[in-house]
Image: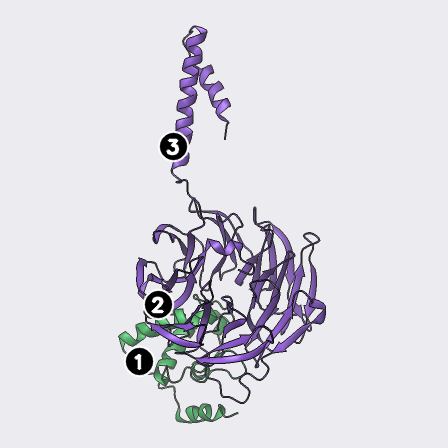
Chain colours: A green, B purple
């Protein structure tokens, strides 16, 4: 349960600084990463593979914070790795928002 | 197509002017020759060539394929319209003319490499991951994530032969991975969610006899079969070790090998599942990617014990043996996927490091190993290297290339 600590810490700090945006260059990199690297498990079109579908309808009803924390910390016991160290909080929140909005084209 | 004889007859019948018999015969012969030339030139658009030096390259983002040739290292043509090809793979028909391409979107496409066209295509599931062709070349099997199971088709026309749902527990269905062909018209595959290995035997006909091996380990993520077709080995994501099935003695069941590997060690996050398809064998040693570690594992195939660990640049994805077994080439998961390392299979050490560029997704040796093809996704390039000098011999444009499949795979068990 050691993974819980950063989760709780992040929640307590209110990681979801929803207003902050990565730079346009970084946004392009993130979109590319989403399609190509997330896509290696979730499918290039995010319709699912070894990992579940990440399309907007598939994620409907899930809070952005939940997705952000899943991206940052992974899901222990599954193949979903933690992306912290590669993505920061602002970037993971931006990706979570893109996923929920279905704005995932590279 | 009508025979030359029929063309001759029709040409003669169409001759309107009454002629003496001899002239008629001469004209008919000329007409026959002309019709043969016309028929020949129509066919000449497809140059007469063999297909043993061809390869198929998946362009994952655009749903297209490139047909390349490895004698002069050039691109012959592009074939479009194959749907979602992320993580696509292919097997080759026994005559090395056709490829069967497994798309992520469940599409199964039969491609004519010589004519550069789609010969047949079916949407056979919602989400698939790979496939295999039977020993006799008559069956092509596809492993599916959604709905989980294996479907088997006739290679002639892609008509459905058998449907094997991967059911387990209380009506659950598992994603299927690691599907390979085995001698005796059999297919072997693993169930990711169920932790099982299934053996589907088609030797008695198109109704398979399915044997199930349960509790093989948590989350088998991919599998391979040794080049002799005897041992099927599944890598386990959910726990340490690998699951081994001896296909000469399936009655002995699945046993665990390398049980101590990784015990008590903290794993790194895995950003890309390793592949086991490129079983690298040199002498009695096999080389496989370690999961979640920057290491290549060496296995003694006589004892199935660990024979060494080779530290490498990142988490390995493909570990591919040059056909002569002297070198083992390794590429890596994100974020180290700009690098390829070459291991000396004799002294078990990295002896060279190449940097083809970001997004090295696949490597494929030419049949006798003098050159290797590397797909570099982010550069939109295929790079061809001399495996002795490690110099780059060619660079070909390709759109987001991933898998490379040489036609010589047709003659290899398990590929």
Dot 2: within a 10 Å radius of its alpha carbon, few (fewer than 14), some, or many (20 or more) residues?
A: few
Residue at which label 2 appears: A106
* Labelled pair 1, 2 in contact (Cβ < 8 Å): no
Marks 1 and 3: same chain?
no
Residue at point 44% right, 16% down? B14
- Percent x, y for residue B243? 61, 74
* Residue B375 visible to an observer of this rendering: yes
Q: In the rendered image of this protein, does residue B117 appear above or below residue B299?
A: above
Q: In the rendered image of this protein, does residue B101 appear above or below residue B265?
A: above
Chain letter of disc 3 in the image: B
Gap between marks 3 and 2 measured at Cα = 45 Å
Tell me the number on the disc at residue A21: 1
- Percent x, y for residue B377? 36, 65
Marks 3 and 2: same chain?
no
**Which residue occupies the foreground of this view, B122 or B204?**
B204
Tell me the number on the disc at residue A4: none
* Labelled pair 1, 3 in contact (Cβ < 8 Å): no
């Amino acid at each position: 349960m050691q993974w819980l600590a950063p989760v709780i810490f992040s929640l307590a700090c209110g990681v979801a600084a929803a207003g902050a945006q990565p730079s346009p260059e970084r946004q392009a990199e993130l979109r590319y990463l989403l399609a190509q690297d997330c896509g290696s498990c979730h499918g290039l079109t995010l319709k699912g593979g070894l990992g579940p579908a990440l399309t907007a309808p598939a994620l409907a009803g899930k809070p952005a914070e939940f997705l952000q924390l899943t991206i940052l910390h992974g899901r222990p016991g599954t193949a979903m790795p933690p992306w912290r160290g590669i993505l920061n909080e602002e970037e993971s929140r931006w990706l979570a928002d893109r996923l929920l909005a279905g704005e995932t084209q590279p | 197509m009508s025979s030359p004889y029929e063309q001759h007859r029709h040409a003669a019948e169409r001759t309107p002017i009454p002629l003496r018999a001899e002239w008629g015969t001469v004209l008919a012969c000329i007409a026959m020759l002309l019709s043969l030339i016309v028929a020949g030139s129509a066919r000449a658009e497809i140059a007469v060539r063999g297909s043993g030096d061809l390869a198929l390259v998946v362009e994952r983002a655009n749903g297209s394929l490139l047909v390349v040739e490895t004698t002069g290292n050039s691109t012959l043509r592009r074939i479009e319209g194959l749907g979602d090809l992320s993580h696509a793979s292919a097997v080759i028909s026994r005559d090395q003319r056709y490829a069967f391409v497994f798309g992520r979107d469940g599409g199964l496409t039969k491609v004519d490499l010589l004519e550069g066209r789609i010969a047949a295509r079916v949407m056979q599931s919602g989400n698939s991951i790979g496939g295999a062709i039977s020993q006799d070349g008559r069956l092509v099997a596809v492993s599916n994530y959604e709905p989980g199971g294996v479907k088997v088709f006739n290679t002639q026309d892609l008509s459905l032969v058998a449907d094997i749902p991967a059911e387990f527990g209380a009506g659950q269905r598992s994603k299927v991975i690691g599907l390979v062909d085995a001698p005796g018209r059999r297919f072997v595959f693993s169930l990711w969610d169920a932790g099982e290995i299934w053996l589907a035997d088609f030797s008695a006909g198109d109704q398979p006899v399915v044997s199930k091996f349960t509790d093989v380990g948590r989350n088998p993520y991919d599998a391979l079969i040794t080049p002799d077709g005897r041992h099927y080995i599944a890598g386990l994501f959910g726990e340490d070790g690998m699951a081994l099935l001896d296909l000469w003695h399936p009655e002995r069941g699945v046993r665990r090998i390398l049980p101590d590997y990784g015990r008590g060690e903290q794993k790194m996050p895995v950003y890309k599942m390793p592949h086991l398809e490129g079983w690298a064998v040199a002498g009695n040693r096999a080389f496989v990617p370690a999961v979640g570690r920057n290491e290549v594992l060496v296995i003694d195939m006589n004892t199935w014990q660990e024979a060494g660990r080779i530290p490498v640049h990142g988490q390995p994805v493909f570990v591919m043996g040059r056909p002569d077994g002297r070198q083992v080439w390794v590429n890596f998961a994100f974020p180290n996927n700009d690098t390829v390392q070459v291991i000396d299979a004799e002294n078990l050490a990295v002896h060279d490091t190449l940097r083809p560029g970001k997004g090295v997704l696949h490597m494929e040796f030419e049949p006798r190993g003098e050159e290797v093809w590397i797909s570099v996704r982010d550069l939109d390039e295929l790079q061809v290297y001399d495996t002795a000098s490690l110099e780059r011999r060619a660079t070909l444009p390709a759109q987001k290339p991933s898998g490379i499949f040489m036609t010589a795979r047709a003659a290899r068990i398990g590929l």
